[in-house]
Image (spheres, rainbow, N blue to C red):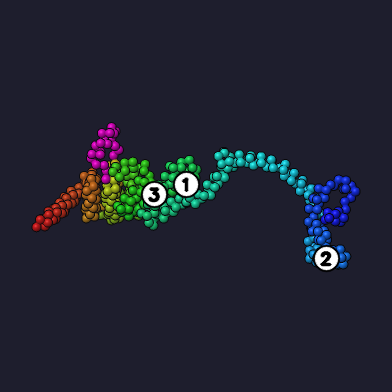
Amino acid sequence: MTELFQELLNPPSSGDRRSIDRADRNDRARADPVALEYLSTLASMPLSQLESSEQQSLAQSSHSLLLSLQSLSKRSHKSIISSAANHSHLRTTLPTLAASTNDLTSAIPKLDNEAVHFSTTYHKSGDNEILNARKRALLLSRNVERLVDVLDLPTLLSTAITTGSSAPAANYASALDLNSHIRRLHGLYADSSLVTSVSIQADEAMQAMAKNLITSLRAPGLKLASALRTISWLRRVVPDLDTTGAAGNGGGLGALFLVCRLSTLINMLAALEPLRELAEQERMRQQQSSNGSAWSGGQQTERYLKRYIEIFREQSFAIVSMFRSIFPGPANEAYSKTVDQDPLQPVPSALSTFPFHLIEMLMETLRTYLPTVKDQPSRDSLLTQVLYCAGSLGRLGGDFGILLATMDVGEEAEDEWVEVVKRHRHMAGRLESIVGGKEKGVPDLVKA
């Protein structure tokens, strides 16, 4: 009966009657369970109830549904209108979406090909200039602090050398350590242009340091300790000057030391130029005057020679003694081995001929100006001073007392010269006897 009511409520058209069979009607009935439930309820109700209360119930249900629709439209009319508007746009949006989808579908193979080409071109194992440049840039970025430290090495080296005058022991030692570090870096990375430029700057700074050290060797008040430190630094800065080391005879470094000290001596003697000019004027006046007394005049010459001999004595003794302390020379066994190995024999020390040059300087000055001194006590004083100077150098193997006999001091002064030499030898003998007595007395006191 439910099916009959359903057909009554939803009558099919004439065309549908011919095409819809009973199975289709059963499917349609199953597809609307609410209608079937309502039809079942109607079938179970009596006729009197249908006539009396069903219409009223339907009217109430219809009114309730109307109120629900009105409240729903009041609450959600904006959403409904927006949905309707958006639904109207779907007719144009869906074709656009379909076209975009087709374009994306056609572009995906191209994108895949480009991705494969990119991965093949810029693979880590491949050789690409852009990748190599990027790797170098990243490597530079990671090691920028180290590179800055390397670039600061020449500046630190120059600063240490520049401030070496205030504290040479510490600053020059630091400069030599920095230079050794730069040389090691240059040996490890010889192909690096950066390290090469740093090494070139370091070489220039070390040349400036060598100049400073050579200048310090020319200082008037040079002491043995300072000279030892300076020579040791020069051995490290300019190793080619002294290939034999500290045990050799000095080589070029020893010659450099002697030249620097000789330059200092010449400068100190040149400071006596005002006195020398007065002595020269006095000598010229004596040559031009034929009536002067044989033993008068020569005061200015005496002042000049006294000061000259004093400076010469101090500096010559200091130069030779300092050289022997800095360059002690090879031992006899090492020297004999060197002679056997080298048929030409080693080059002698620069000190072997240096005293002759010093003595010749003094003798030339004495030959020129000593005859000008006519006063006998002044002449005796000068000759005694020269003998003391000869004895001072004689303790170092440079006694030139015998050469004084070759000077032409005048026929009248020869006897005087002999007396001065005798007196000097007598005083030297007494001094040696006193010193010898003291040396003998010390062991006796120790035994007692």
Residue depicted at 39% across the width and 57% down the height? 166
First in sequence, mark 3 or 1: give its number.
3
Front-lying residue, 155 or 92: 92
Say whether residue 82 is left or right of residue 283.
right
Residue depicted at 46% across the width and 42% down the height? 189
First in sequence, mark 1 or 2: give its number.
2
For label 2, the SS is helix
The residue where tag 1 is placed is 198
The residue where tag 2 is placed is 61
Front-lying residue, 368 or 136: 136
Q: Position of residue 265 (x, y in %)?
A: 32, 50
Q: Is residue 266 visible?
A: no
Can you tell which mark lies on residue 176? 3
Q: Residue furthest right?
A: 14
For label 3, the SS is helix
Magenta span of residues: 328-348
Say whether residue 127 is magenta. Answer: no
Residue 330 quadrant: top left
Residue depicted at 80% across the width and 57% down the height? 36
Q: Position of residue 285 (x, y in %)?
A: 32, 51
Q: Residue furthest left?
A: 448
